[in-house]
Amino acid sequence: MKKQAKRIGLAIIGAGRVGLIRGEIAARYPQVDWIGLAEKNPERAKLVADKVGADFTTSDFRELLKQPEVTAVIVSTDEHLHVDPIMAALERKLPMLIEKPLATDLAESAGVLAAIERAGVDAVVGYTQRFRRRWLVAKEKVRTGALGDVTMVTSRAFMNRLVAIDNYKRTDNPAEISPMVISGTHALDVVMWLMEAKKPVEVYARSVDKALGPQWKGIDGTGYVITFDDGAIYHGVISWALPEVWPGAVYSLEVGAVGTEGVLTIDDTHRDIVLAVNKAQGEGYAPHESRRVDFLTSYPVGDIALGELRGPMREETNSWLTRLSLGLPTQHATAAEGHNRLMLTKAIDLSARLKRPVTLPISADDEKRGR
Ligand SMILES: NC(=O)c1ccc[n+]([C@@H]2O[C@H](COP(=O)([O-])OP(=O)(O)OC[C@H]3O[C@@H](n4cnc5c(N)ncnc54)[C@H](O)[C@@H]3O)[C@@H](O)[C@H]2O)c1
């Protein structure tokens, strides 16, 4: 079969940490012959434009989306600012890679999903961990029945509080963000991807707020049990309140899946690569200077080595560009899955607030009425 690769003119909306990473990767991709940036912070726009060799730069994403060269869009604005750029890109029916979460408000997320489906646009959501070999192997073993019928799954996500503080600092409405919506969604997506043949029907959760509550009006962590229609259960905990001296820069995860015929455990805590130094090193989120020990590779997007990002976000970005240029299928999360993950994280937070089980799925009205 002869392959005809299509050219890509890429619009990146939001040139922060992720916009820069994806832009640098895209700049090296053979079929990308044009990159445009929309970034509202002018200094940041200039820095990223220089690094990726941008052909067009503006502070206004609508201007960018008017450019005739654009054939695809990355929406990498802050979590609560994805919706307007998505809706604008839909007007031109441009395929999109949207950073997680799809939106931070459940009604907006449902509206965005409906608009994407109406437009028939290929929009995927950045659940980057799906591009790691360990989760792919796990997915394959569950999918091909190695464990028999999976009856119990557990996940434990432990995160340095630097991530939480970074998020709480950037919002004037701390109630809008939570460890589940912002970060727990990655562990949740991995598990729900493994369990995709089953339908979640109920969630029960509790949260604590003693470390991040007083200063940031935030939540430290949440524990939850999701029940599936066949009685299978998924138990998860996330804390993003670990002290700044905790050696994991960002994410430590353990997952166990038990089935009728087998068990699978995945240690993704990054305790296998330990760096101890006399002078604090900046890895991922700048650590407190008292932290001299690092579990390397715990920054989920990957690590810079020999001047380039190595790791899952590179795989994910390249894979998406191949999806666009060659039309090949990929394991990216669909917009429907993105909305489902937001709904589940909101239902978990709702159950924790109400301190009682919540029937799944929930609607935006259920969430508002506190049902
Ligand atoms: N997949 C992953 O592993 C992963 C990792 C980190 C972040 N993320 C997600 O990526 C997204 C971006 O995160 P980040 O860490 O890059 O944040 P960031 O704050 O570094 O970058 C966001 C940028 O968007 C710009 N921006 C906001 N609204 C804009 C608008 N309307 N027009 C133009 N520019 C605008 C901001 O000025 C900022 O520079 C978030 O949704 C986050 O959850 C995903």
Image (tube, rainbow, N blue to C red):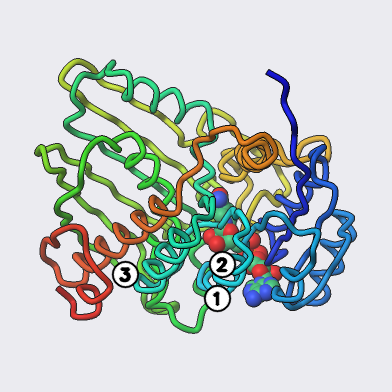
Q: Which amino acid does the dot numbered 2 rest on?
A: Ile
Find the distance from the CA under tag 2 to the CA under tag 1: 25 Å
Q: Quadrant of ligand 1?
A: bottom right
Q: Earlier in the sequence, mark 2 or mark 1?
A: 2
Q: Nearer the viewer, residue 127 or 95?
A: 95
Residue tagged by mark 3?
209
Q: Is residue 100 visible?
A: yes
Find the distance from the CA under tag 3 to the CA under tag 2: 33 Å
Q: Which amino acid does the dot numbered 1 rest on?
A: Lys
Q: Position of residue 340 (x, y in %)?
A: 33, 55
Dot 1: element: helix
Task: Look at the numbered disc 1 and say if its residue's Cβ is closer than 8 Å to ligand 1.
Answer: no
Residue at the spot x=20%, y=23% of the render?
259
Q: Position of residue 212 (x, y in %)?
A: 40, 70
Q: Which circle, 1 or 3, is nearer the viewer?
A: 1
Q: Quadrant of the C terminus?
A: bottom left
Figure check: 79 above or below 135? below
Res. 223 mark = none
Q: Quadrant of the N terminus?
A: top right
Whether label 3 touches label 2, CB < 8 Å: no
Residue tagged by mark 2?
86
Residue tagged by mark 1?
169
Residue at the spot x=56%, y=75% of the render?
84
Q: Nearer the viewer, residue 287 or 290?
A: 287
Dot 3: element: loop
Whether label 1 touches label 3, CB < 8 Å: no
Residue at the spot x=62%, y=62% of the render?
76
Q: Is residue 166 visible?
A: no
- In screen coordinates, is 244 left or right of 292? left
Q: Position of residue 119 (x, y in %)?
A: 50, 61
Residue at the spot x=44%, y=62% of the render?
118
Q: Which amino acid does the dot numbered 3 rest on?
A: Asp
